[in-house]
Image (spheres, grey):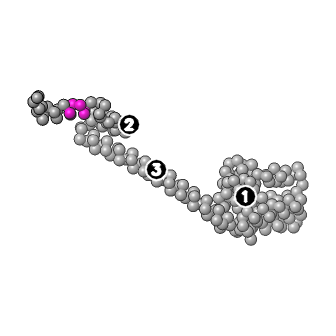
Amino acid sequence: MTDPAAPELVRDEIARILNRPEFGGEKSIYEELFDDVAAWFERSAGAESSERVVWAFTLAVALGFVLWVGFRIARQIGAERRSREVGADPAARVDPGRVAELERRAQAARAAGDLRGALRLYWYALVYGLGECGNLSYRDAWTNRELLERGRPDAAARALLEPLLSDIEAKEFGRVPPTDADVERVARLCERALGGAGA
C-alpha cells in the first residue's frame, strides 16, 4: 500500500493541470481589446490611472451603444405611429385649407373652360394631399416624375399615381387635349384618396 500524497502536493498538481490552456476559457475579442488598451495606458501612465481611464472608456463606449440602440428604437416606434395615424384617417393630417383652395381653383378653371389648368390643379391637390398624409415625400420643386422616383411613395400612392402620370403629362404639356372626363376622373381620385379633406 502506498502512502497518500501530501495535501499541498495534490493542490499544486491540480492547480498546474487546471492552468493548462485546454482548461482555461479563451478571452473574447472585447477582453483582448480591453487588455491591449490597458497595456497601452499602463505604458504611458501609471497602472492605477490607466485602469481608471480604461474603465471610463469602456463605460463611454457602452453608453454610446445603448444611446444609439435607444435612438434607433425610438425612430422606429415614431415611424410606426405615423404610419398608423396615416392609415387610420388620411384626411386627419391634410391641411384642408390648402387642399380646398386648390380644388376651388380647379373648379373655377374647369368652369372657365381651362381643362388643362383644372387637370393640373386637381393633380397638384392630389399629390400635395398624399404628401401631407405621409404617403409620399412631397416637394414643390419636384416634377411629377421626381415625386414618384424621389418621393418614395408607399404602395397605395404608387398604385394611384403611376397609371395617371403619363396621361397627365401628355395632357398637361399639350400633346393631347384634356377632356372634361379626364378632369372629373382626377377630381374623383383626389376626393377618394384624401377622404374629402378639402371639402
Q: How far across and down, in percent of the image, does residue 18 sit?
A: 25, 33
In the displayed orientation, state which residue is furthest to the front: 1
Residue 29 numbered mark, or none: 2
Magenta residues?
14-19
**Number of other residues with Cα within 10 Å of mark 2, as a class: few under 14, some 14 to 19, many 20 or more:** few
Q: Residue furthest bottom?
A: 199
Q: Quadrant of the N terminus?
A: top left
The residue that mark 1 highlights is: 127
Label 2 element class: helix
- Tell whether position 87 is magenta: no
* Residue 16 within the magenta-colored segment of the rendering: yes
Distance between mark 1 and mark 3 Cα atoms: 35 Å
Residue nearest the observer in this picture, 166 or 15? 15
Q: Nearer the viewer, mark 2 or mark 1?
A: 2
Amino acid residing under circle 1: Val
Q: Which residue is drawn at the image coordinates 39% and 47% (left, top)?
A: 62
Amino acid type at image mark 3: Trp
The amino acid marked with disc number 2 is Ile
- Percent position of residue 100, x then y: 74, 68
In the picture, the disc for residue 4 is none
Residue at screen point 53% across, 58% down: 77
Instruction: Give the overall secondary structure of the magenta segment.
Output: helix
Describe residue 62's horizontal placement relative to residue 140 as left or right. left
- At x 29%, y 30%, the residue is 21
